[in-house]
Image (spheres, rainbow, N blue to C red):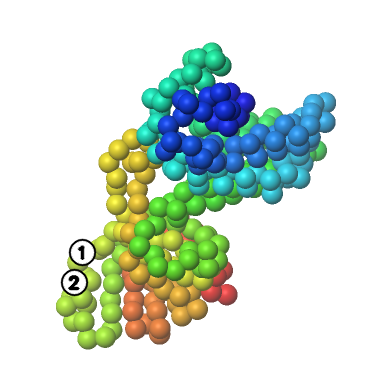
Amino acid sequence: VLQGYAAEMDNPLMAHLISPELQNKKDILFGNMEEIYHFHNRIFLRELETYVEYPELVGRCFLDQMEDFQIYEKYCQNKPRSESLWRQFSDSVFFQECQKKLDHKLSLDSYLLKPVQRITKYQLLLKEMLKYSKNCEGAEDLQEALTSILGILKAVNDSMHQIAITGYDGNLNELGKLLMQGSFNVWTDHKKGHTKVKDLARFKPMQRHLFLHEKAVLFCKKREENGEGYEKAPSYSYKHSLNMAAVGITENVKGDAKKFEIWYNAREEVYIIQAPTPEVKATWVNEIRKVLT
Protein backbone atom coordinates (compact mmCIF):
# COMPACT_ATOMS: atom_id res chain seq x y z
CA VAL A 1 0.00 0.00 0.00
CA LEU A 2 2.79 2.44 0.89
CA GLN A 3 4.83 1.65 -2.22
CA GLY A 4 2.07 0.86 -4.69
CA TYR A 5 -0.34 3.67 -3.74
CA ALA A 6 1.09 6.29 -1.36
CA ALA A 7 4.47 6.65 -3.10
CA GLU A 8 2.77 6.67 -6.51
CA MET A 9 0.87 9.82 -5.51
CA ASP A 10 4.24 11.59 -5.62
CA ASN A 11 5.34 9.92 -8.86
CA PRO A 12 5.58 12.55 -11.66
CA LEU A 13 4.71 9.88 -14.25
CA MET A 14 1.39 9.24 -12.54
CA ALA A 15 0.54 12.91 -11.88
CA HIS A 16 -1.71 13.22 -14.95
CA LEU A 17 -4.05 10.56 -13.50
CA ILE A 18 -4.59 12.35 -10.21
CA SER A 19 -7.42 14.87 -10.12
CA PRO A 20 -6.45 18.29 -8.69
CA GLU A 21 -8.73 17.87 -5.64
CA LEU A 22 -6.88 14.69 -4.69
CA GLN A 23 -3.39 16.18 -4.94
CA ASN A 24 -1.69 16.95 -1.60
CA LYS A 25 -4.26 14.79 0.20
CA LYS A 26 -1.91 11.87 0.77
CA ASP A 27 -1.76 12.46 4.55
CA ILE A 28 -5.53 12.46 4.85
CA LEU A 29 -5.96 9.28 2.83
CA PHE A 30 -3.23 7.22 4.47
CA GLY A 31 -3.07 8.84 7.90
CA ASN A 32 0.03 7.71 9.78
CA MET A 33 0.10 4.25 8.19
CA GLU A 34 3.77 4.70 7.39
CA GLU A 35 4.53 5.29 11.07
CA ILE A 36 2.64 2.10 11.96
CA TYR A 37 4.49 0.16 9.28
CA HIS A 38 7.92 1.32 10.49
CA PHE A 39 7.08 0.58 14.12
CA HIS A 40 6.19 -3.00 13.20
CA ASN A 41 8.96 -3.53 10.71
CA ARG A 42 11.87 -2.03 12.65
CA ILE A 43 10.86 -2.50 16.27
CA PHE A 44 7.95 -4.76 17.15
CA LEU A 45 8.58 -7.61 14.70
CA ARG A 46 12.24 -7.90 15.77
CA GLU A 47 11.22 -7.88 19.43
CA LEU A 48 8.63 -10.61 18.79
CA GLU A 49 11.21 -12.73 17.01
CA THR A 50 13.35 -12.86 20.14
CA TYR A 51 10.47 -14.71 21.86
CA VAL A 52 10.06 -17.46 19.26
CA GLU A 53 11.44 -20.07 21.69
CA TYR A 54 9.55 -18.64 24.70
CA PRO A 55 6.08 -17.69 23.49
CA GLU A 56 4.66 -17.59 27.01
CA LEU A 57 6.92 -14.62 27.79
CA VAL A 58 5.65 -12.54 24.86
CA GLY A 59 3.53 -10.38 27.18
CA ARG A 60 6.72 -8.56 28.17
CA CYS A 61 7.27 -7.61 24.53
CA PHE A 62 3.86 -5.91 24.40
CA LEU A 63 4.42 -4.13 27.70
CA ASP A 64 7.79 -2.75 26.59
CA GLN A 65 6.22 -1.28 23.43
CA MET A 66 2.85 -0.25 24.87
CA GLU A 67 3.46 3.46 24.45
CA ASP A 68 4.08 3.01 20.72
CA PHE A 69 0.72 1.31 20.28
CA GLN A 70 -0.89 4.70 20.75
CA ILE A 71 -0.02 5.45 17.11
CA TYR A 72 -3.15 3.43 16.34
CA GLU A 73 -5.30 6.00 18.09
CA LYS A 74 -4.03 8.64 15.68
CA TYR A 75 -4.77 6.37 12.72
CA CYS A 76 -8.33 5.61 13.85
CA GLN A 77 -9.10 9.26 14.55
CA ASN A 78 -8.16 10.13 10.98
CA LYS A 79 -10.14 7.21 9.52
CA PRO A 80 -13.46 9.07 8.99
CA ARG A 81 -11.66 11.80 6.98
CA SER A 82 -9.82 9.16 5.00
CA GLU A 83 -13.05 7.28 4.22
CA SER A 84 -14.93 10.34 3.07
CA LEU A 85 -12.03 11.25 0.75
CA TRP A 86 -11.93 7.69 -0.59
CA ARG A 87 -15.66 7.76 -1.34
CA GLN A 88 -15.23 10.91 -3.43
CA PHE A 89 -12.42 9.47 -5.53
CA SER A 90 -12.80 5.68 -5.33
CA ASP A 91 -13.48 5.40 -9.06
CA SER A 92 -10.48 7.53 -10.00
CA VAL A 93 -8.32 6.17 -12.83
CA PHE A 94 -5.26 6.64 -10.62
CA PHE A 95 -6.48 4.12 -8.03
CA GLN A 96 -7.59 1.66 -10.70
CA GLU A 97 -4.17 1.89 -12.33
CA CYS A 98 -2.33 1.28 -9.03
CA GLN A 99 -4.57 -1.67 -8.19
CA LYS A 100 -3.96 -3.22 -11.61
CA LYS A 101 -0.17 -2.87 -11.27
CA LEU A 102 -0.24 -4.45 -7.80
CA ASP A 103 -2.54 -7.20 -9.03
CA HIS A 104 -4.67 -6.75 -5.89
CA LYS A 105 -8.08 -8.39 -5.91
CA LEU A 106 -9.36 -5.88 -3.33
CA SER A 107 -9.44 -2.13 -3.70
CA LEU A 108 -7.43 0.26 -1.52
CA ASP A 109 -10.16 0.82 1.12
CA SER A 110 -9.91 -2.84 2.22
CA TYR A 111 -6.24 -2.31 2.98
CA LEU A 112 -6.79 1.00 4.75
CA LEU A 113 -8.99 -0.90 7.19
CA LYS A 114 -6.15 -3.28 8.13
CA PRO A 115 -4.61 -1.23 10.97
CA VAL A 116 -8.05 -0.89 12.61
CA GLN A 117 -8.55 -4.65 12.33
CA ARG A 118 -5.03 -5.35 13.58
CA ILE A 119 -5.32 -3.43 16.82
CA THR A 120 -8.56 -5.26 17.62
CA LYS A 121 -6.98 -8.61 16.78
CA TYR A 122 -4.17 -8.31 19.34
CA GLN A 123 -6.51 -8.61 22.28
CA LEU A 124 -7.94 -11.86 20.81
CA LEU A 125 -4.45 -13.30 20.35
CA LEU A 126 -3.43 -12.35 23.89
CA LYS A 127 -6.64 -13.86 25.32
CA GLU A 128 -5.91 -17.06 23.43
CA MET A 129 -2.31 -17.18 24.71
CA LEU A 130 -3.47 -16.59 28.27
CA LYS A 131 -5.79 -19.57 27.99
CA TYR A 132 -2.77 -21.86 27.47
CA SER A 133 -0.41 -20.12 29.88
CA LYS A 134 -2.37 -20.25 33.12
CA ASN A 135 0.27 -21.35 35.61
CA CYS A 136 3.49 -20.62 33.81
CA GLU A 137 6.05 -17.88 34.06
CA GLY A 138 4.93 -14.86 32.06
CA ALA A 139 1.20 -15.31 32.67
CA GLU A 140 1.07 -12.09 34.70
CA ASP A 141 2.75 -10.14 31.92
CA LEU A 142 0.30 -11.57 29.38
CA GLN A 143 -2.61 -10.52 31.58
CA GLU A 144 -1.16 -7.03 32.02
CA ALA A 145 -0.52 -6.76 28.27
CA LEU A 146 -4.12 -7.75 27.57
CA THR A 147 -5.40 -5.16 30.04
CA SER A 148 -3.22 -2.48 28.43
CA ILE A 149 -4.34 -3.35 24.90
CA LEU A 150 -7.98 -3.26 26.02
CA GLY A 151 -7.22 0.17 27.50
CA ILE A 152 -5.88 1.35 24.14
CA LEU A 153 -8.95 -0.04 22.36
CA LYS A 154 -11.19 1.82 24.80
CA ALA A 155 -9.23 5.04 24.21
CA VAL A 156 -9.48 4.54 20.44
CA ASN A 157 -13.22 3.92 20.71
CA ASP A 158 -13.78 6.89 23.05
CA SER A 159 -11.77 9.22 20.84
CA MET A 160 -13.77 8.13 17.78
CA HIS A 161 -16.88 9.35 19.62
CA GLN A 162 -15.17 12.49 20.87
CA ILE A 163 -14.17 13.70 17.40
CA ALA A 164 -17.87 13.52 16.48
CA ILE A 165 -18.85 16.24 19.00
CA THR A 166 -20.20 19.34 17.24
CA GLY A 167 -21.02 22.79 18.56
CA TYR A 168 -18.55 22.92 21.45
CA ASP A 169 -16.91 26.37 21.49
CA GLY A 170 -13.77 25.72 23.48
CA ASN A 171 -10.91 23.29 22.94
CA LEU A 172 -11.83 19.79 24.12
CA ASN A 173 -8.17 19.02 24.82
CA GLU A 174 -8.22 21.57 27.63
CA LEU A 175 -10.73 19.46 29.54
CA GLY A 176 -8.08 16.86 30.35
CA LYS A 177 -8.23 13.18 29.49
CA LEU A 178 -11.49 11.65 28.26
CA LEU A 179 -12.28 8.98 30.86
CA MET A 180 -15.68 7.61 29.85
CA GLN A 181 -18.46 8.15 27.32
CA GLY A 182 -21.90 6.61 27.01
CA SER A 183 -25.64 7.09 26.50
CA PHE A 184 -28.09 7.70 29.36
CA ASN A 185 -31.59 8.78 30.27
CA VAL A 186 -31.38 12.13 32.05
CA TRP A 187 -33.98 14.01 34.12
CA THR A 188 -33.19 17.55 35.27
CA ASP A 189 -34.44 19.42 38.27
CA HIS A 190 -33.43 23.08 38.59
CA LYS A 191 -34.06 24.91 41.85
CA LYS A 192 -34.34 28.37 40.35
CA GLY A 193 -38.09 28.88 40.06
CA HIS A 194 -38.52 26.78 36.92
CA THR A 195 -41.64 25.16 38.29
CA LYS A 196 -42.52 23.88 34.84
CA VAL A 197 -39.15 22.20 34.38
CA LYS A 198 -39.56 20.66 37.81
CA ASP A 199 -42.95 19.24 36.90
CA LEU A 200 -41.68 17.96 33.58
CA ALA A 201 -38.66 16.39 35.24
CA ARG A 202 -40.78 13.70 36.80
CA PHE A 203 -41.99 12.34 33.51
CA LYS A 204 -40.04 12.25 30.30
CA PRO A 205 -36.28 11.70 30.37
CA MET A 206 -33.95 13.22 27.79
CA GLN A 207 -31.61 10.96 25.86
CA ARG A 208 -28.11 12.31 26.42
CA HIS A 209 -24.64 11.12 25.55
CA LEU A 210 -22.23 11.97 28.36
CA PHE A 211 -18.51 12.54 27.99
CA LEU A 212 -16.63 12.50 31.30
CA HIS A 213 -13.34 14.39 31.19
CA GLU A 214 -11.01 15.08 34.10
CA LYS A 215 -12.19 18.70 34.29
CA ALA A 216 -15.77 18.63 33.01
CA VAL A 217 -18.67 16.42 32.09
CA LEU A 218 -20.31 17.19 28.72
CA PHE A 219 -23.96 16.55 27.91
CA CYS A 220 -24.60 16.00 24.19
CA LYS A 221 -27.49 14.93 22.03
CA LYS A 222 -26.79 12.01 19.74
CA ARG A 223 -27.75 12.36 16.08
CA GLU A 224 -27.75 9.25 13.92
CA GLU A 225 -26.57 9.93 10.40
CA ASN A 226 -27.77 8.18 7.28
CA GLY A 227 -25.13 6.72 5.05
CA GLU A 228 -22.50 4.04 4.74
CA GLY A 229 -19.72 2.99 7.10
CA TYR A 230 -18.38 5.91 9.08
CA GLU A 231 -20.93 8.21 7.48
CA LYS A 232 -23.45 6.30 9.54
CA ALA A 233 -21.42 7.01 12.65
CA PRO A 234 -23.41 9.27 14.96
CA SER A 235 -22.52 12.85 15.71
CA TYR A 236 -23.08 14.49 19.07
CA SER A 237 -24.38 18.02 19.32
CA TYR A 238 -23.10 19.73 22.44
CA LYS A 239 -25.77 20.91 24.89
CA HIS A 240 -24.00 21.97 28.09
CA SER A 241 -21.19 21.03 30.45
CA LEU A 242 -20.53 20.99 34.18
CA ASN A 243 -17.19 21.89 35.66
CA MET A 244 -16.04 18.94 37.81
CA ALA A 245 -14.77 21.35 40.46
CA ALA A 246 -18.37 22.24 41.34
CA VAL A 247 -19.96 18.80 40.91
CA GLY A 248 -21.31 16.53 43.62
CA ILE A 249 -22.66 13.00 43.31
CA THR A 250 -25.36 10.95 45.01
CA GLU A 251 -24.80 7.28 44.38
CA ASN A 252 -28.21 5.85 45.13
CA VAL A 253 -31.57 7.08 43.96
CA LYS A 254 -34.59 5.51 45.68
CA GLY A 255 -36.28 2.77 43.74
CA ASP A 256 -33.80 2.30 40.90
CA ALA A 257 -30.44 0.53 41.03
CA LYS A 258 -29.47 2.03 37.66
CA LYS A 259 -29.88 5.67 38.68
CA PHE A 260 -27.48 8.12 40.29
CA GLU A 261 -27.45 11.89 40.68
CA ILE A 262 -24.98 14.50 39.58
CA TRP A 263 -25.64 17.86 41.18
CA TYR A 264 -24.09 21.22 40.63
CA ASN A 265 -23.40 24.28 42.79
CA ALA A 266 -24.77 22.83 46.03
CA ARG A 267 -27.80 21.18 44.40
CA GLU A 268 -28.86 24.27 42.49
CA GLU A 269 -29.09 22.00 39.45
CA VAL A 270 -29.72 18.29 39.84
CA TYR A 271 -29.36 15.72 37.07
CA ILE A 272 -30.82 12.28 37.62
CA ILE A 273 -28.96 9.88 35.38
CA GLN A 274 -30.15 6.40 34.52
CA ALA A 275 -27.56 3.98 33.18
CA PRO A 276 -28.48 1.06 30.93
CA THR A 277 -27.37 -1.43 33.63
CA PRO A 278 -26.32 -1.35 37.33
CA GLU A 279 -22.79 -2.37 36.19
CA VAL A 280 -22.46 0.66 33.91
CA LYS A 281 -23.72 2.87 36.73
CA ALA A 282 -21.12 1.42 39.13
CA THR A 283 -18.28 2.06 36.66
CA TRP A 284 -19.34 5.66 36.13
CA VAL A 285 -19.87 6.35 39.82
CA ASN A 286 -16.39 4.98 40.58
CA GLU A 287 -14.77 7.01 37.84
CA ILE A 288 -16.55 10.22 38.91
CA ARG A 289 -15.59 9.59 42.52
CA LYS A 290 -11.94 9.22 41.48
CA VAL A 291 -12.09 12.58 39.68
CA LEU A 292 -13.72 14.30 42.67
CA THR A 293 -11.21 12.98 45.17
User: Residue 279 at what x, y percent from top left?
Assistant: 45, 55
Marks 1 and 2 sit apart, C-alpha to C-alpha, by 7 Å
Query: With respect to residue 243, does 50 lie above or below?
Result: above
- Quadrant location of the C terminus in the rendered image: bottom right
Tell me the kind of residue under disc 1.
Lys
Q: Residues within 10 Å of mark 1 (few under 14, many from 20)?
A: few
Amino acid type at mark 2: Leu
| Mark identifier at residue 204 | 1
Q: Establish if 92 lies above or below 135.
A: above
Whether label 1 touches label 2, CB < 8 Å: yes
Nearest to the observer: residue 11 or residue 46: 11
SS at badge 2: helix
Asked whether residue 176 appears in the rendered view, the answer is yes
243 w.r.t. 54: above or below: below
x%, y% of residue 209? Answer: 36, 58
Circle 1 — which element?
loop
Q: Which is more toward the observer, 95 or 231?
A: 95
- At 35% across and 52% down in the image, what residue appears? 235
Q: Which residue is mark 2?
A: 200
**Residue drawn at 50 percent across, 15 percent down:** 100
Q: Residue at x 41, y 26 (%)?
A: 92
Query: Mark 2 packing: few (<14 Cα in 10 Å), some, or many (20+)?
Result: some
x, y percent for residue 278: 41, 57
Q: Give the residue at x 46% y 80%.
A: 246
Quarter where residue 153 is shown = top right
Q: Classify residue 227 as left or right of residue 156.
A: left
> Image quadrant of residue 198?
bottom left
Residue 158 at x, y percent in the picture: 49, 52
